[in-house]
Structures are given as C-alpha cells and as structure tokens.
Amino acid sequence: MATPPSLRIDNLMAALDAAEIGQQPGEVHGALVGLICGGVEQSKKAWNSTFLELMNDGQPLPDALQQLIDELYQDTLARLSDADFGFTPMLPEEEEPLAKRVEALSLWVQSFLTGIAMVQPKLNRASSDVQEVIKDLAEIALVEFDVADDDESESAYMELMEFSKMAALLCYSEFGPEPTEQEAGVIH
C-alpha cells in the first residue's frame, strides 16, 4: 500500500508548524499508533479527544491539520490491521543524518508509550511478552542521540526501528480491536 502523498513527513511537519503545534511528525504518529495499539475506541470522537488531550492540551486543531490527522489515523489503522499493508513508524528517510533519525525514533517510541498508557490501564496485567516489549521500548526511548555515522550504528538503528515496529504490532494484536469474521477469513 503506497503512502498517500498528503501523508509525507514534510507535509505533516508543515501543517504542524502552520498550526504552531510543537510536535514532530514522528511524535504525532507514535501517539496515534500507541492509541490504536492500546485499543482506543474506534469512533472519531473517542480517539480524537484522547489524541487532542495528549498532543494539544485538549484544544481543537485547525481544520487542515485535523483533516491530515484523520487521514493519518485511518492509514495507520489500515496498516496495523493488515500485515500486507506494511506498517512502519513514521520516521525521517535514510538520507537524513543518523543522529536525526535516532532522535526521531526515540520521540516516536516515547509518544507510542504515552499513547498506549493513556488508553490501556491494564499494561501491568498484559502478557509477559507485551510487558517485556514495553520495558524494552522504554529503554529505546532513552537512546543517546550522539551516534557515530557508521555502518555499525546504522545497523543498530535499523534493529531498533524494526523492534519498535514489531513491538507495536504485538501490542495491537493483544489490545487492538477483535478482527471481524470477514477480516479473520471465516467463510460461511
């Protein structure tokens, strides 16, 4: 599934800047993914009010930014619920300096953890796998930004990004909505 042009990271950054929202695109995406993976109610009113509380002190967003957030939410939900759509965290492209990508990953993970914690009060009663993943994500959120721009650091970054992706999918499988019979492939 191709990413809609409107959901490019630079478009989201421009919309956030225009609205004077002091968040990075990765933080916004991480929060949305955390809410979805935590099992936030799927109605727009429910997820959007929780999102606004987290990202903008409960205040409404300008229409253009809200429309972009709505589109990002729907795209993210589709990618999380269908493995073929290729969910991945919204992070800077590999052309960006490694330190910038590491910082963005750290911010994405922090926002993911905050989002999931807001809607999933039973994290301490989650499966041992999910509890371990949450603990590991908390460590990733503390990663140092001052990294060498070499193959070893690049490889470590890719491992952390892949781990974050798989951790989100694991949380979604545990807390996300139950698949409908049609989505589960049940044929009558």
Image (cartoon, grey):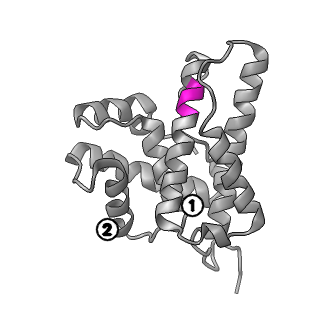
Task: Write down the quadrant of residue 145 in the picture.
Answer: top right
Query: In the rendered view, would you say 71 is above or below 21?
Result: below
Q: Position of residue 39 (x, y in %)?
A: 53, 68
Query: Which residue appears farthest toward the top when viewing the image?
Result: 149
Is 6 contained in the magenta span? no
Element under disc 1: helix
Q: Main secondary structure of the magenta part?
A: helix
For disc 2, the marked residue is 45
Residue 103 in view (yes/no): yes
Q: Position of residue 186 (x, y in %)?
A: 71, 80
Element under disc 2: helix
Inter-mark Cα distance, 2 to 1: 17 Å
Q: Quadrant of the C terminus?
A: bottom right
Q: Nearer the viewer, residue 166 or 180?
A: 166
Upstream in the sequence, badge 2 or badge 1? Answer: 1
Is 104 contained in the magenta span? yes
